[in-house]
Image: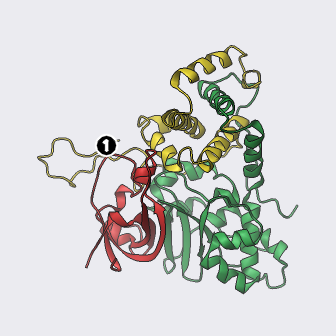
Amino acid sequence: MPHDHHDHHTPPRPDNDEPLTYWQTMEIAVRELLVEKGVTTPEEIAGAIDRMDARSPTDGARVIARAWTDPDFKVRLLTDASAACREMGFDIGPMHLIALENRPGLHNVVVCTLCSCYPRYLIGPPPDWYKTRAYRSRTVREPRSVLAEFGLTLPEGIELRVHDSTADMRYIVLPERPAGTDDMTEDALAALVTRDSMIGTGLPRQPG
Amino acid sequence: MDTRRAGTYPAAMSNPPIKSWHDMGGDIAGPVPKDDHDFALWEKRVDALLVLCAGKGIFTVDGLRRAIEDLPPDAFETMTYYERWISSVNRNLIEAGIYSPADLALRMEKISARGASYGEAAQ
Amino acid sequence: MTSRVRVRNWHPPGHIRTPAYLRGKTGTIERKLGPFPNPEQGAYGLAAKNLALYRVRFTMRDIWGDTAEAPGDTLEAEIYAHWLEPAD
């Protein structure tokens, strides 16, 4: 199915039938206490999980494909990415989003050195590697080496711009539209947009 | 790893500032591991509790980060991502007066008695 | 705020959103954002004062000197107003 952008098939974490851990016990206790104190309800918690589960790189891919096909939308995206996402009907919660445009001679990549800030309210929680010491430490110091590990070797003439999500803004990369896609529909273009191409550690898929 | 910022302060200063463990930008580190995992239900629940508590103004995302940063330096290696989160969510809720440490201890004791697996204990 | 700014070379304990590797470094304001509540207060459950937030652009040479991987590459980060001083 063309909208499946999960780049990896990944094993689940140990779940219900594994031995109970201390921190799992704390999660159950905190949740029950919050319900008992009237702060939240089981339904509200289930709803929050459902809303986060529904967010995926597919949503970001639709935004990117719209920007590739609609020049006015692209202007709005680059001016106020939060508003542009909401205009497309996405529930991005409280997120303040900035879209970073790749263009000939400029490639953008996103990191959070202080924690793991990520545009999760549009494309879901970050992959594990985004949260690792290696990615967080090295992407501001030797970003070209990091990108090379992802299979992306940037020529010397291209400026690499690293964005450290240090405060209130979140970032999504608007990759360049691949060549040879002039006849493709917005839906078909969205299928070329990978999660990593929106973080900046990859490029969109080539058509065909 | 010695993360003191040598050279920033005069040598006479006997206790040079230590860069907190969470402030990793520029540190030396190995290759980026690419393995990934899908989230377990308990991890999704921790995520939801943060989203809801922050949305209700009980504490802020910066409160979440602060209590994670105040964990011991080895927490990044000895605890998983959502273990650090639930530790911090709990701390912020106690600080906000939602419940007491004793409330938590009593509840955790009851939960442990329900069964040996998450499925049994979470009812 | 002038266009060329220096990040304060302060190292207090506490919840700070200015990464250590940028402290004392000089860059150029790319855009002004906010205001946003001061995380140094909000992190402790205190009423937080609204602050301007600046996106500051640095060259990798600004940050890492001659040992930069590619000195002409750039980096942008968000820095709150009270962590910046004019560099000119």
Report if residue A208 is visible in the image: no
Q: Position of residue A70 (x, y in %)?
A: 75, 83
Chain A colour as displayed:
green
A159 or B65, nearer to the observer: B65
Please state, as top left, top right, bottom left or bottom right, where the N terminus of chain A lies in the image.
bottom right
Nearest the eye: A188 or A40: A40
Residue drawn at x 45%, y 47% is: C43
Q: Which residue is mark 1?
A: B2
Q: Residue furthest right?
A: A1
Q: Which quadrant of the structure image shows residue A39?
A: top right
Classify residue B114 as left or right of residue C25.
right
Quarter placement of the C terminus of chain A: bottom right
Q: Colour of chain C?
A: red
Name chain B's colour: yellow
Left or right of B21? Residue A187 is right
Q: Is residue C46 visible?
A: yes
Query: Circle 1 — which element?
Result: loop
Residue occupying the point 37% across, 67% down: C81
* Residue A149 occupies quadrant: bottom right
Indicate the position of residue A9 as horizontal and vertical percent values. 76, 48
- Depicted B24 relative to depicted A18: above or below: below
